Image (spheres, helix red, strand yellow):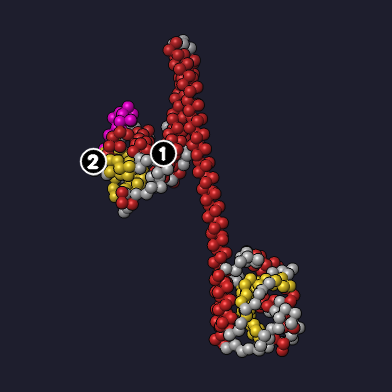
Amino acid sequence: MTTHERERLAALHEYRLLDAPAGDELEAVVRVAAMIAGVPTATLNLIDENRQCQLTTTGFEGGDSDRADSMCAVHFEKGEFIYRRDARLDPGYALNPWVTGVYANVRFYASAPLVTPQGHALGSLCVFDDEPHELSAAQIDRLKDCARVILALFERRRQARVNGELAGELAATIAELRRSNTELEQFAGVVSHDLAAPLTVVRGYLELLADVGLDDPEAADWIAAARRAVGRMSGLISSLLSYAQAGNAPCRIEPARLGDVAELALTDLRSALDDAVVEVDPALPELDCDPTLMRQLLQNLVGNSLRYRRRDRVCRIGIAARRVDGEWAVSVADNGIGIPPEQRQRVFDMFAQVDPTARQGHGVGLSTCQRIVDRHGGRITAGETPGGGTTITFTVPARDTAVTAGRR
């Protein structure tokens, strides 16, 4: 078998038409072809390696036959329209069993090849009669049009099948991702909870050792270092719990005054505010959101601004919002150390840190923010504050365009 024939057969089988129901549309085109030619019989032939499959016929009962016996198989790969007023007069057809009476007594014969855009001949649209017959140029052109329509229907059926398979695969992938995410969230929650209990015990014993007042300065340093490590581990566990809860807790969308939510978030951070100046725009809007998750979001963003403040000036933080098209853009701006432009996208990745050596955070806070914003159907970005610092902006659909996708 030649390479060309292997490619042709692969193209034919890709359409998955052989031995399958033709369907109403293909049957209709074959009936129209017979009417155009002015003959009682027509067939849609597909030719594979060994046989001719009459996918649908009109005027007679079709079936399969050997490829060697097929009239269409003689010239179909040339991609040319074939027309014989009387096939008995053509040496290439005179002894064919469709002409001699074995299968039929074909006299008039015409076929339009079915050639894909890639040049692969799949078979032909064939019209015939047991009496000699003439075709006009206009009839030939219309039969060629019918062949093109058949190929378009083939392609539409193939594309519908491919799209269906892709949709099925996509649905399965989404289901698997959801299952995996749920398991990861549950894992993070369980592990974090189970780690918190023994860590509390370790912290208690370290505090007891510190209260004993050991005379050995080196031992005291060791205890202090251990207490710092426990504190950092405790912070990481809290961050992981927050991340798991942000993705696993129900998202209940309801009208909430953003100003009230911001005040509650600042109340949670009161002990960390120190001399920081936080300005909350009095015109903050009412949003359709989950108030608990929105409070956690603002608390994380303001907490980041406090954590990454500059020590050479008073920390200033501003919370504002503006309407942009069909959504609210809420910003938390500070005058801190800022985020380099090349890092402003990756800071939302899990455990991503601008400067890991600084050991100022766990790289979970902004990932949690990303998750909360995603559940509200919005986007979150990091930019630069005029004069230096970081501005984090997230969007929430406005009331008249609010989505319900996050309510899961």
Q: Residues under labels 1 and 2: Cα distance?
A: 29 Å
> Is 182 drawn above or below residue 398 in the view shown?
above
Query: Residue 83: x, y in percent?
Result: 64, 85
- At a point 63% along the width and 65% down the height, the residue shown is 20
Secondary structure under the numbered disc 2 in the rendered image: loop
Rendered image: mark on residue 369 = none
Q: How many marks?
A: 2
- At a point 69% along the width and 83% down the height, the residue shown is 106
Type of the residue with mark 1: Pro
- Quadrant (top left, top right, bottom left, bottom right) of the N terminus: bottom right
User: Closest to the observer: 76 or 157?
Assistant: 157
Would you say residue 327 is visible in this rendering? no
Callout 1: 10 Å neighbours few (<14), some, many (20+)? some
Query: Residue 403: x, y in percent?
Result: 37, 49
Would you say residue 282 is visible in this rendering? yes
Query: Residue 309: x, y in percent?
Result: 35, 34
Type of the residue with mark 2: Pro
Q: Which comes sooner in the sequence, label 1 or label 2?
A: 1
Tell me the residue that label 1 is attached to: 250
User: Closest to the observer: 3 or 24?
Assistant: 24
Instruction: Tell whether 268 sits left or right of 241.
Output: left
Rendered image: mark on residue 282 = 2
> What stretch of residues is rendered in magenta?
266-279
Q: In which quarter of the image is residue 383?
A: top left
- At a point 26% along the width and 43% down the height, the residue shown is 284
Q: In which quarter of the image is residue 310?
A: top left
